[in-house]
Image (spheres, helix red, strand yellow):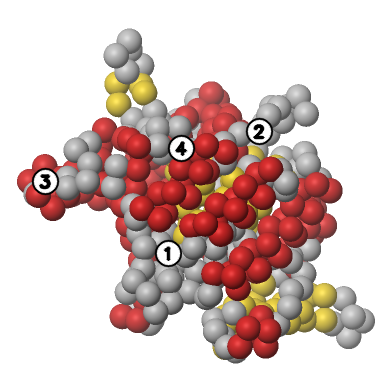
Amino acid sequence: MDKIDIHTHILPPEWPDLAEQFGGGRWLSMQQRLDASGVCRGASLYCDGNHFRDVQPNCFDHAVRLEEMERTGVRMQALSTVPVMFSYWAEPDQTLYLARLLNDHIAEVCRAFPDRFAGLGTLPMQNPELAIGELERCMNELDMSGIQIGSHIDRGDKPDWNLNEPAVFDVLQAAADLGACVFVHPWDMMGSEQMRRYWLPWLVGMPAETSRAMCSVMFGGVLDRIPHLRICFAHGGGSFPGTIGRIEHGFRVRPDLCAVDCSTNPRDYLARPAPNGGVKPARVYVDSLVHDPAALDRLIDLFGAERIALGSDYPFPLGEAMPGAMIEAMDRLSHETRTQILSLTPSEFLGLRVPLSEG
């Protein structure tokens, strides 16, 4: 069975010292770790001069990545940057400069191995005009499948934008018009200053960030106004599936607060019975990264297998070491459902022109 992983991250093996080039800021830098014989054994990442995390060669060496894909049975990966690289806080022209570097690298890897990798670009989302220009380049020149954006746009010393903001809407409309899929990934988690211990920003903040993004898109009427938008939310939709009851109840009892921009009940965007029988899948996609069979059952019930795509968060610790292994081990899932999640839904979301089994 072909496995297509829509949620993987990659960095270039090197990039300029942006702090030196632009002066200060939260720029990420990387220092490779070489052994005594000069072989790279990984790298250390630094943000604003402080150690951020260590990564293995599979984060930036696509040859290592291909070997691991063979070992884990992954036919294709969608490549996107590491979200700390979004850099929406910077001056727009600076973020555009970095985005072009990252997108060019991803496109280069995809061109070298077109049957193994698809590309998702990054944009300077704090400036819609520049973002749309780079989006057009990603789709028309770099032949990417779509883009990855943050769960909100942290604009430095300016107020943040949620995904319902008119400026963000313009980018989403352009993505839909260009046939670009949109993968939403959390970053810059709200409440991080109050959650300094136990890795809580990643365990609690990230799921909440994703729910924030989903609710903003739904309450903001984005899905009604852009019916052909293909949008997917990382980590199984975060905390949204567990709180949809509360979200819907709030919509019903306080429409003066929740229904001010859209009269559609949030649950109506989820899977529901079709008029002619069967089930109509949700209007949005989620990836499968929930680490728990019962949670995946809940996703299937809420979204339908046609809107759940394999996502592993490769190559990071909170990801799935063996992409799709949990799905393959769930005997209660039919072969058709497993195939849908592992291959067909990812293919549809990415807009692959030829099924992998044929290409």
Sequence-first disc among 4 and 1 = 1
Sequence-first disc among 1 and 2 = 1
141, 74: nearer the viewer: 141
Give residue 153's mark: 1
Sequence-first disc among 4 and 3 = 4
User: Disc 2 versus disc 4: distance between alpha carbons?
Assistant: 16 Å
Sequence-first disc among 2 and 4 = 4
- Please say if the residues under marks 1 and 3 sit with CB atoms less than 8 Å apart: no
The outermost residue toward the right is: 37
Give residue 352's mark: 2
- The amino acid type, in three-letter code, at marker 4 is Leu
Which image quadrant: the N terminus? top right
User: Disc 4 versus disc 1: distance between alpha carbons?
Assistant: 19 Å
Circle 1 SS class: loop
- The amino acid type, in three-letter code, at marker 3 is Pro
- The amino acid type, in three-letter code, at marker 1 is Ile
User: Disc 4 versus disc 3: distance between alpha carbons?
Assistant: 25 Å
Image position of 218 (left or right of 47): left
At a point 65% along the width and 38% down the height, the residue shown is: 3
At a point 74% along the width and 58% down the height, the residue shown is: 104
Circle 3 SS class: helix
- The amino acid type, in three-letter code, at marker 2 is Leu
User: Disc 1 versus disc 2: distance between alpha carbons?
Assistant: 28 Å
Residue matched to label 3: 255
Circle 4 SS class: loop
Image position of 98 (left or right of 263): right
Residue matched to label 4: 229
